[in-house]
Image: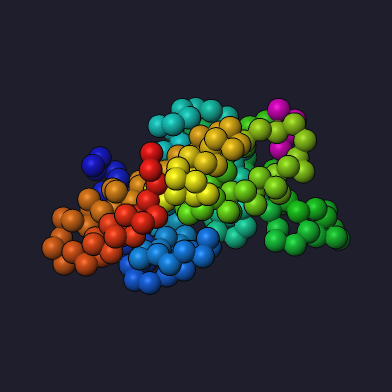
Amino acid sequence: MEQYKHEFIEFLENAGVLKFGDFTAKSGRKIPYFINAGDIKTGAQIQKLGEFYAKAYFEKLGKKQAVLYGPAYKGIPIAVSVSVALAQQGLDVPFFFNRKEEKDHGEGGVFVGYKPAENEEIVIVEDVITAGTAIRESMDILSSLNGVKVAAVFVMVDRKEKGKTEKSAMAEVGEEFGFPVYSVVDVYDIIEYLEENEANRENVERIKNYLSVNGAKE
């Protein structure tokens, strides 16, 4: 495993973003671990998170000039932190996010921040994809913008779970909408990280058992 991936997983665990236990995902599945960007609570943590996303952005998209979109609510601080991290590396990109409820006074509308123009490319930044539900919701919201194109999606972790078919939810989303979905790490990186410490044996076995049933066949 690359060193930055190890550092990222360690960061997620120390920040309380990566937890182990019994959880229910947005998809309704019972899962043995949980990724929650909502547990980022300090300036230093959100700064660090943005730097890891920015590293993945540069690796996959280079210096592409795109517009960052952070779906409410967890995607909002991610989009802000990634835009700051990219700017610090010489790539100044705009960002915007949505309201959960459309505003009917003031400037109105469902979006806050930059207003993408026709032919501009959007990069969605999310915390995680389990069944692809949240990304499909984002695509419905973004469909109100005329002439823009989603160039890619970035998430923290690829859970490597099957979606509606035997393929992974990330692969399904990419095929359905025609853009790549990238992750900083995947669940097998997490397993490799956990296996470095014998005390994590139970969590490793639970995740492996879960993947034996819900893991994607690719």
Q: How is the image coloured?
A: rainbow
Read off the magenta span. Answer: 115-119
Given residues 73 and 81, the one toward you in this image is: 73
Given residues 163 and 138, the one toward you in this image is: 163
Where residue 209 sits in the image (x, y, percent)?
29, 60
At 36% from the left and 56% from the top, the residue drawn is: 213
- Horizontal side of 183 relative to 174 (left or right) equals left
Note whether residue 41 is visible: no
- Horizontal side of 191 relative to 75 (left or right) equals left
Where residue 35 sits in the image (x, y, percent)?
42, 60
Taking the view exactly as shown, the residue that stands out farthest to the left is 198
At 39% from the left and 55% from the top, the residue drawn is: 214
Where residue 132 sits in the image (x, y, percent)?
54, 50
At 80% from the left and 60% from the top, the residue drawn is: 103
Where residue 59 sits in the image (x, y, percent)?
40, 32
Taking the view exactly as shown, the residue that stands out farthest to the bottom is 22
